[in-house]
Amino acid sequence: MQASNIHYKILTIPGLHNSGPAHWQSLWEQKFTSTERVELGHWDDPDQDEWVAAIADAIDAQGSPVLIAAHSLGCHAFAHWFAAANGLARARVAGALLVAPPDLARLPRQGRIASFTPSPMLMPRQTFIAVASENDPYASTAHVWRLARNWGARFVNAGPFGHINADSALGDWPYGQYLLASLQPAPTPALADEALWTRSGDWPHRFARRDPRFAYQEGAQRR
């Protein structure tokens, strides 16, 4: 897929342990010039509130709507941010691709990762897509399907690709790029110059007043 098919800035939100150089998020950051990683901090010992605050700061700094490409635990952090955000902040998100969100019950619950709680129900006006893998060690497809329902997202089964990370050997994941591009809102049709169509619309009426052939003859219609 050509980079020109993506017309919005992309914010990538990695998960636990961050995304390495062979991860599709890192490769997208190289391929798409207008892409920025949200630096969540404490990648190996994350705290939910800190990650949500980092996402809030990153999105508040945007001057126009962005596409979200989140992976793994980053999906849960984004969902918590979206649930707490006001309408103005939510409007800065054009769409969200939520890839391989884990079942929190399958994650080790020691340390600050235990601070992550089940994501609340979302009702986005934008398009969200939740992507599952058939053999993800951290979540069954049924679990991701339930998350998609809870998040108001479309559900996509991407096939047997593990946790959809660098170990999946997806490269820059063309299918993911296709899904990301599909999130973009349809452009609003450009209207013609109002002055032009006002004048053109007025023209037959002015012409009719001058030419009796265009005049409505009530007596003729009664015959």
Image (tube, helix red, strand yellow):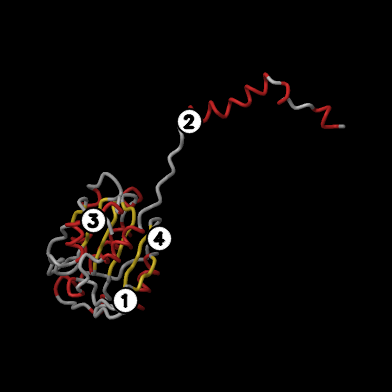
Q: Position of residue 46 (x, y in %)?
A: 16, 67
Task: Name the residue tied to disc 3.
Answer: 11
Side (left or right) of 122 relative to 166? right
- For the residues marked 4 and 3, what is the alpha-carbon distance in whole angstroms? 21 Å
Q: Quadrant of residue 165?
A: bottom left
Would you place residue 145 above or below residue 95 in this image? below
Element assignment for label 3: strand
Q: Which of label 1 and label 4 is nearer to you?
A: 1
Q: Position of residue 136 (x, y in %)?
A: 26, 78
Of the pair 181 and 91, the residue shown nearer to us:
181
Q: Residues within 10 Å of mark 1 (few under 14, many from 20)?
A: some
Q: Who's the residue at 19% across and 77% down the image?
A: 109
Mark earlier in primary sequence (2, 3): 3
Q: Who's the residue at 73% across and 21% down the image?
A: 212
Task: Name the residue tied to disc 1.
Answer: 159
Mark earlier in primary sequence (3, 1): 3
- The amino acid at mark 3 is Leu
Task: Name the residue tied to disc 4.
Answer: 123
